[in-house]
Image: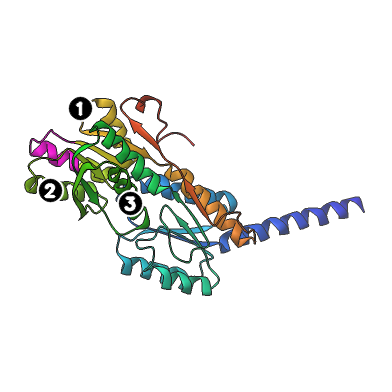
Amino acid sequence: MKIIKTIVAAAAIAAAMSGAQAQDADMQVGVTVGTLGNPFFVPLVAGAKDAILKAYPKANLTVLGADYDLNKQTSQMENFIASGAKLIMLNAVDVNAIAPVVARAKAAGITIGAFDVAAKGADVTVMTNNVQAGQIACDYLAERLNGKGEVVIINGPPVSSIVDRVKGCKDAFAKHKDIKILSDDQDGKASREGGLAVMQSLLTRFPKIDAVFGANDPTAIGADLAARQLGRSEMIIAGVDGAPDVVTALKSGSTRIVASSSQDPYGMAEKAAQLALGVIKGEKPAETTVLLDTKLVTADNVKDYVGWDAKR
């Protein structure tokens, strides 16, 4: 009788494990992000994937980049819906225009976890406090300029993170009546190449630029490259991300970049995925939108900064 009970118990455990494995394999997850060409998205995607695979080791994940193309991202979302996804982790290229396909996904019973940028209709959202990020970066620029000078803001794609950073920067500059914004509507494509191209144009238009705010670090790096190419050394530059390339530049002491508001892409995506998985299990989050403050990295404190490439 004891042997029979043992066999029955073992069979029950095996059945439970088999059921769990089947549940894992049935967990279809789609991840779509603005681009896979920006180093920021490497730890961002990794944070989401690690959280999902920790909960569902056999989950089937598909990760795609939309190249900041709304039509492309919409098509990716439609494919996730058709494939029977249970969760879509969404880094939206347009906070409002993505809403119709988000609604279709939710109507199909799919949970939507927005990360890094907002997406109208998402079940949960975790992102950097981007207004604060732009504000502290431009507060620092204004301080370095002693509240006086001519500045430019290199904008980016119309994602919520960029829009909020530019707002925070403008709010910071607006506190100083002697700071004049020469340009704030040029799209640097959130890339090094885009920042380079926009900055080349701005340097041609304006004989003097005292400071530059790049909507992210690749944009700021591109602006620095343009200034170097044209032999312009009068400006200081700040960005947002706390990217490894900017950390290296700040440590070198030979860059026009003076600051970056640092993000935690891995932790941000990990938190978003955890909350979204909780929604699938019927757990209502205390907050549907979580904002994570940034810290300013400068040449003075960069030695103490724990960056994206830190071991997790």
Q: Name which residue type carries label 1.
A: Ser
Label 2 vs label 3: CA separation? 20 Å
Say whether disc 1 or disc 3 marks the residue closer to the N-terminus: 3
Q: Nearer the viewer, residue 148 or 86?
A: 148
Q: Residue 275's spot in the image, x, y percent?
A: 56, 54
Label 1 vs label 2: CA separation? 22 Å
Q: Quadrant of residue 266?
A: top left
Q: Residue 28's spot in the image, x, y percent?
A: 52, 63
Residue 225 within the magenta-colored segment of the rendering: yes
Residue at the disc numbered 1: 254
Q: Classify the position of the N terminus by image quarter.
A: bottom right
Q: Residue 229's spot in the image, x, y percent?
A: 9, 38
x 42%, y 31%: residue: 306
Residue at the disc numbered 3: 167
Looking at the image, residue 250 lies above or below residue 100: above
Say whether disc 2 or disc 3 marks the residue closer to the N-terminus: 3
Report if residue 156 is visible in the image: yes
Q: Nearer the viewer, residue 145 or 33?
A: 145
x 40%, y 42%: residue: 263
Disc 1, SS: loop
Of marks 2 and 3, the one in the foreground: 3
Q: Residues within 10 Å of mark 3 (few under 14, many from 20)?
A: some
Q: Nearer the viewer, residue 297 or 113?
A: 297
Report if residue 243 is visible in the image: no
Q: Name which residue type carries label 2.
A: Leu
Say whether disc 1 or disc 2 marks the residue closer to the N-terminus: 2
Of marks 1 and 3, the one in the foreground: 3
Label pair 1/3, CB-CB below 8 angstroms = no
Disc 2, SS: helix
Query: What residue span does the magenta drawing correspond to?
Result: 223-235
Q: Name which residue type carries label 3.
A: Lys
Q: Which mark is residue 202?
A: 2
